[in-house]
Amino acid sequence: MQRFVEYVSSYELEGGWKTEKRKSHPLHSLCSRTGSFPPALARWYIERCSAPGGVVLDPFSGKGTAPLEACLGGRIGIGNDLAPEAYILTRAKVRPVTFGEVKGWVERNRRFIEGYRSSDAPEEVEVFYSRRTLRQILAVRELLREPEEDVDWFVSAVMLGILHGSSSDSLSVKCSHSFSMSPGYVKRSVRELRLRKPERNVPDCILMRARRVLCEGIPSVRGDAFNVDARSLPLGDESVDLIVTSPPYFSMQTYAWDNWLRLWFLGHDYREVAKRLFHTSSVPKFLEFMEEVLRESHRVLKRGGACVLVLGVVRLKGVLINMAELLLPVAERVGFEPIRIVADEIPKERKYLMYLDRSQGVGREVVLELRKR
Ligand SMILES: C[S@@+](CC[C@H](N)C(=O)[O-])C[C@H]1O[C@@H](n2cnc3c(N)ncnc32)[C@H](O)[C@@H]1O
């Protein structure tokens, strides 16, 4: 059977995210993390495919971009991610606290943090920090070992955001803010480039970051966050109005390794986390995983609800794979109806692509729009 799906250019969408001029809410810059999509993309779909008061889900929420946009737009944003640091970031976005609450937390704990004497940390962690700063990080780590209140979770997320980077509130030697760099590389850079490990006061840096991200207040709608496998969500049948998500791109991103220092701060070994996260270079394994994910997404979505998958064109073992075309037949099999594919570049020769015939040459980002029949 020949089926057709329409291709649309992301640059030609009316008011599309590529040409969006509105500034994003500062809470999005709580912490940078690899593999995230732009807030404007999530906003575009949330505004068009859901109504205020509706439930918007991202089963692979990363740093919580889509759930935060949902709450800002008056929807109930629900995020889920199996990675511990992603869960904490998502939770902080859907259950944020006020600056006053963060200030209260810092002032209650300042003496303990500034007076902490132990500096017992693994060598690979030590290379990033001055002695005094490291002692204070260890103190905060101890205080947040078992977060209870929303403010504990929020401060934990702020710490993930300032743990490494190059801004004036970053605690580490100058390095990437979006991923944790390799300790060997940082050690060499410190030696060869004579990089200075800054003497930071951690309570002040927490306040600085919190003030910046909370300066426009918090959304009036609160959402929820989960830390489970996307194939088995703790949500009822037909309880969600819209899904906007971006699953792992095969083995293109190494989330656990990219966040090893943040995971250490949270008391996890990145190698153990890596074993749990989905990661493969095998097309059959990817399809098997995604079939289960799509089946679960279909179960929780209301009839007629849209499911938007932000995907890419990836090169795997030398072959270009358009993930949207790859997943279309799987999505249909579990009961979704294709709406269209939105791509950075439309394949040259035609506007409609016969999706049983795999073509190449589309741009980096492809968005597969589906609807539950
Ligand atoms: C492309 S990223 C999503 C990024 C997100 N859209 C954002 O804006 O930050 C894919 C996410 O899938 C998560 N992940 C990997 N395997 C998972 C699984 N089995 N269940 C749930 N989440 C998983 C990763 O931790 C990663 O955050």
Image (cartoon, helix red, strand yellow):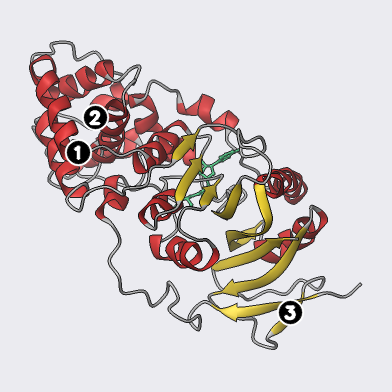
Residue 322 visible in rendering: no
Give the Cα separation between the discs numbered 3 and 1. 52 Å
Label number found at residue 353: 3
Q: Position of residue 334 (x, y in %)?
A: 79, 52
Q: Position of residue 75 (x, y in %)?
A: 44, 53
Residue shown at 43%/42% (left/top)?
A: 223
**Do the residues bearing badges 1 and 2 touch, measured as CB atoms within 8 Å?**
yes
**Do the residues bearing badges 3 and 1 touch, measured as CB atoms within 8 Å?**
no
Q: Name the amino acid, label 3.
A: Leu
Q: Position of residue 162 (x, y in %)?
A: 23, 39
The residue where tag 1 is placed is: 190
Q: Name the amino acid, label 2.
A: Val
Which is in the foreground here, disc 1 or disc 2? 2
Describe residue 327's horizontal placement relative to residue 90 as left or right.
right
The residue where tag 2 is placed is: 127
- Name the quarter where the N terminus is drawn: bottom right
What SS does tag 3 mark? strand
Q: Earlier in the sequence, mark 3 or mark 1?
A: 1
Name the residue at the right extreme. Answer: 1
Residue shown at 24%/44% (left/top)?
A: 165
Write down the quadrant of residue 138 in the picture. Answer: top left
Confirm if mark 3 falls within 8 A of ligand 1.
Answer: no
